[in-house]
Image (tube, grey):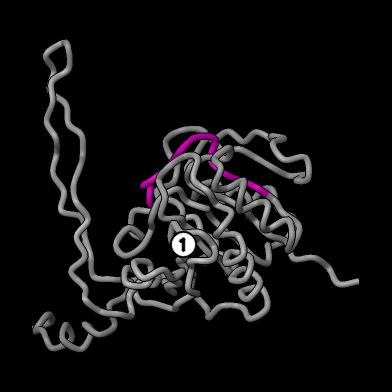
Amino acid sequence: MKKKPLILVTNDDGISAPGIRALISVMKEIGDVVVVAPDSPQSATGHSITIYNTLYINKVNIDDDVEQEYSCSGTPVDSVKFAVKEILKRKPDLCVSGVNHGSNSSINVIYSGTMSAAVEAGMEGIPAIGFSLLDYDWNADFEPSKPFIKKIAKQVLEQGLPKGVILNVNLPKLPEKDIKGIKICRQANAMWEERFDKRTNPHGREYYWLTGEFVNMDDGEDTDEWALAHGYVSVVPVQYDLTAYHAMQQLNSWKLNS
């Protein structure tokens, strides 16, 4: 009898978030699931890790069909590190992170705790995918996304991924019948035009809220932003090697050693 794949599930919205519960339900159809995720929301934590505070891990029982579920007091990356180094007896066949409540397309991948957890798994040599739904509502409907999540996860298990590559998958907020398909994309050239909203509390002390507007400066029809705007699931292969290879020749022409 063929052994089921071992799948590590994590996220950044917290172990009780509806998004990760939806992801767990799909992964249970594919393999044996182990869940290690933050005990509270950790959005926009990026690739941060806990080094100055203690870490606590608690075994929890949220889903009766999952024997191993653990909440972590740290970040999404902490959760993956702990799963790989302390909990799992062998390296998982797949790590999936999400489903994030909100977009992680374009430049958002840099800030995303969801994607950083997947990247951490990739750094450990584990095929990894980050899933995000373009709906920030805590009670978002994840049902239309499930067939696409399952299809992509199964393909990664069957085909593998190139070394050092992780998939950033974003799902449009649409009924399943209106999702046109899956597109392999590049990351759009977009950014946040940010500002700080200055306020004063009842005690007279000034404080600030970070706010801003997302601006897409990319007209290409091969980007994640275009795909999502036109009803497709976007799949962007990303890497943790941040070397700008195209710039090396120019830098080598500088007279740095003269």
**From the image, which quarter does the C terminus lie in?**
bottom left
Name which residue lies at 29% across and 62% down: 107
Q: Give the answer, above or below, for where 244 lies relative to 173.
A: below
Q: Position of residue 19 (x, y in %)?
A: 54, 47
Q: Can residue 116 be seen in this view?
A: no
Residue type of the residue flagged with mark 1: Leu
Q: Is residue 233 visible?
A: yes
- Asked if the stretch drawn in magenta spans residue 193, the answer is no
In this picture, residue 232 sits left or right of residue 69: left
- Asked if the stretch drawn in magenta spans residue 44, the answer is yes
Q: Where is residue 198 in the image (x, y as percent from the top left)?
A: 11, 31
- Crowd rating for badge 1 (residues with CA inside 10 Å; few <14, some 14–19, many 20+): many
| Residue that extends furthest to the top in the rendered view of this protein | 203
Q: Between 242 and 185, which is closer to the camera in this rendering?
A: 185
Residue for badge 1: 171
Name which residue lies at 48% across and 42% down: 13
The part of the image, by quadrant, that contains residue 59 is top right
Q: Give the answer, above or below, for where 240 lies relative to 26.
A: below
In this picture, residue 189 sits left or right of residue 62: left
Q: Position of residue 134 (x, y in %)?
A: 41, 55
Q: Between 238 and 175, which is closer to the camera in this rendering?
A: 175
Q: Between 203 and 58, which is closer to the camera in this rendering?
A: 203
Magenta span dominant secondary structure: loop
Q: Give the range drawn in magenta.
A: 35-47
Q: How many marks?
A: 1
